[in-house]
């Protein structure tokens, strides 16, 4: 599986992302109930001093679902703030 990554800035210190996540990141964020680390995740990165970290919002069913969601989000956020996700090969 290729690593796909899409993100959009939500504010000065917050970013919405669609990408893979490593098992160690999931463990650090104390994420449970999503199965293993294989797949794509929708999550928010927060870099504010008191709340830094990630919050996983959802796990996507497939690479195609990740690409489609990224396309939808890119339309919503506009091309100025969104970095497109790469299509699966």
Image (spheres, rainbow, N blue to C red):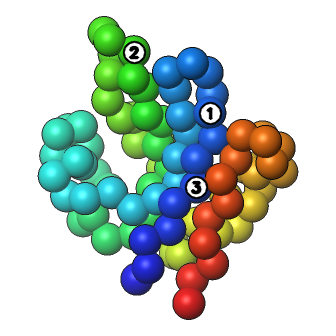
* Picture disc at residue 48: 2
Q: Residue furthest bottom?
A: 89
Q: How crowded is mark 3: few (under 14 residues within 10 Å), some or many (20 or more)?
A: many
Q: Position of residue 64 (x, y in %)?
A: 61, 77
Residue occupying the point 58% across, 55% down: 6
Residue occupying the point 32% across, 11% down: 49
* Picture disc at residue 26: none
Q: Name the residue under label 3.
A: 6
Q: Mark 1 points at which residue?
A: 9
SS state under label 1: strand
Going from the N terminus, do you reach mark 2 or mark 3 first?
A: 3
In 3D space, how far apart are the residues under numbered discs 1 and 2 (Cα atoms)?
A: 14 Å
Residue occupying the point 43% across, 71% down: 3
SS state under label 2: loop
In 3D space, how far apart are the residues under numbered discs 3 and 1 (Cα atoms)?
A: 11 Å
Q: Which residue lies furthest to the top in this view?
A: 50
The answer to whether one can see residue 60 in this image is no
Quarter where residue 86 is shown? bottom right
Q: Residues within 10 Å of mark 1 (few under 14, many from 20)?
A: some
Above or below residue 28? Residue 63 is: below
SS state under label 3: strand
Q: Quadrant of the C terminus?
A: bottom right
Above or below residue 74? Residue 11 is: above
Residue occupying the point 57% across, 83% down: 88
Q: Quadrant of the N terminus?
A: bottom left
Above or below residue 27? Residue 71 is: below
Looking at the image, residue 72 sits to the left or right of residue 5; the answer is right
In front of the other: 73 or 62: 73
Q: Position of residue 34 (x, y in %)?
A: 32, 56
Q: Are marks 3 and 1 in contact (CB under 8 Å)?
A: no
């Amino acid at each position: 599986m290729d690593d796909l990554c899409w993100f959009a800035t939500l504010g000065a210190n917050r970013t919405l992302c669609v990408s893979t996540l490593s098992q160690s990141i999931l463990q650090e964020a104390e994420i449970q109930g999503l199965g293993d680390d294989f797949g794509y995740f929708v999550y928010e990165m927060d870099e504010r001093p008191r709340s830094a970290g990630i919050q996983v919002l959802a796990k996507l069913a497939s690479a195609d679902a990740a690409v489609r969601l990224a396309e939808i989000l890119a339309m919503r956020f506009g091309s100025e703030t969104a970095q497109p996700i790469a299509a699966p090969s």
